[in-house]
Structures are given as C-alpha cells and as structure tokens.
Image (tube, helix red, strand yellow):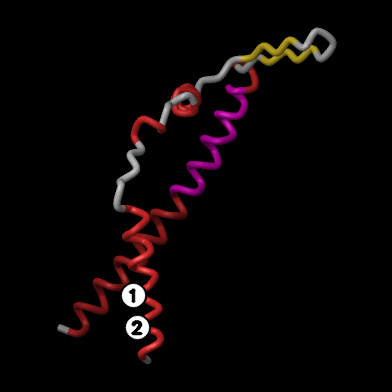
Amino acid sequence: MLRFVKFLTMLSVMFCALGQSYAQSTRTTTTTTTTKNTTTQRKAVLNFEDELVEGGTQKPELFYLFQKKNFNYKRLIKLRENFLPEQRRTAEDIQRVRGAN
C-alpha cells in the first residue's frame, strides 16, 4: 500500500511539472503571436500640439472600469444613529479588560 501511495505521489508530481512546462512553452509562443498581431491591429496617434489622442483597445474590461469610476457609492452608505456610541462603549470595554489584567 505504501508503494502505491508513493507511486501515485510521484506520478502526480511529474504530471503537474509536465503540465506547467507545457503551459509555459505554449504561452510564450502565443504571446509572441499575439504581440505581432496586436502591433499590426492597434492604432494610436498622439499629437501634443493640438492635444489630440486617438487609439483603440480590444479589452472590454476597460469600459467596465470607466463605468465603475462614475458609480455613486454615497447612496449605499447609511450612518446608523447608534454607531458612535457603540464604538465608544467598545473602547471603554477594552480599556476595562486591559486594566483588569
């Protein structure tokens, strides 16, 4: 039984190592290909004299971030009336416990 457990452990370690090495080599190739495609597809023009910036992006996450920036969080915050008194009581309780020790 102990041999079987050792065999399974070694097999799983080898499997993980093979998977990671294969993933790394594939990713490098993909990144190189993506970089070549991106440079040909991406277009950016910067003209600082007229302060004109033109460009394009293929990441939809960018628009999500812009929408998230404009979100009004103030409507979600509600201050409880007993919040500050609770905090003071908690601070006093902690001081009492520390003073007793």
Task: Please name the predominant secondary structure of the magenta segment in the image.
Answer: helix
Membership of 35 in magenta stretch: yes
**Closer to us: 10 or 57:** 57
Residue 34: percent from left, percent from top: 55, 29
Residue at (19% x, 78% y) in the render:
4
Residue stretch rendered in magenta on the structure: 23-38
Residue tagged by mark 1? 93
Q: CA distance from mark 1 to mark 2?
A: 6 Å
Q: Is residue 2 above or below residue 33?
A: below
Which image quarter holds the N terminus?
bottom left
Residue at (62% x, 17% y) in the render:
42
Residue 52: percent from left, percent from top: 73, 10
Quadrant in which residue 6 is drawn: bottom left
Image-based side of 66 in relation to 76, left or right: right
Residue 64: percent from left, percent from top: 44, 25
Disc 1 + disc 2, Cβ < 8 Å: yes
Residue at (73% x, 13% y) in the render:
45
Quadrant in which residue 98 is drawn: bottom left
> Which residue type carries mark 1?
Asp
Q: Is residue 37 above or below residue 96?
A: above
Q: Is residue 13 above or below residue 5?
A: above
Query: Residue lying farthest right?
Result: 49
Query: Residue lying farthest top?
Result: 50
Mark 2 crowd level (few <14, some 14–19, many ≥20, 10 Å Cα) = few
Query: Residue lying farthest left?
Result: 1
> Which residue type carries mark 2?
Val
Membership of 5 in magenta stretch: no
Q: Is residue 101 above or below residue 28?
A: below
Residue at (55% x, 36% y) in the render:
31
Marker disc for residue 97: 2
Q: Secondary structure at mark 2?
A: helix
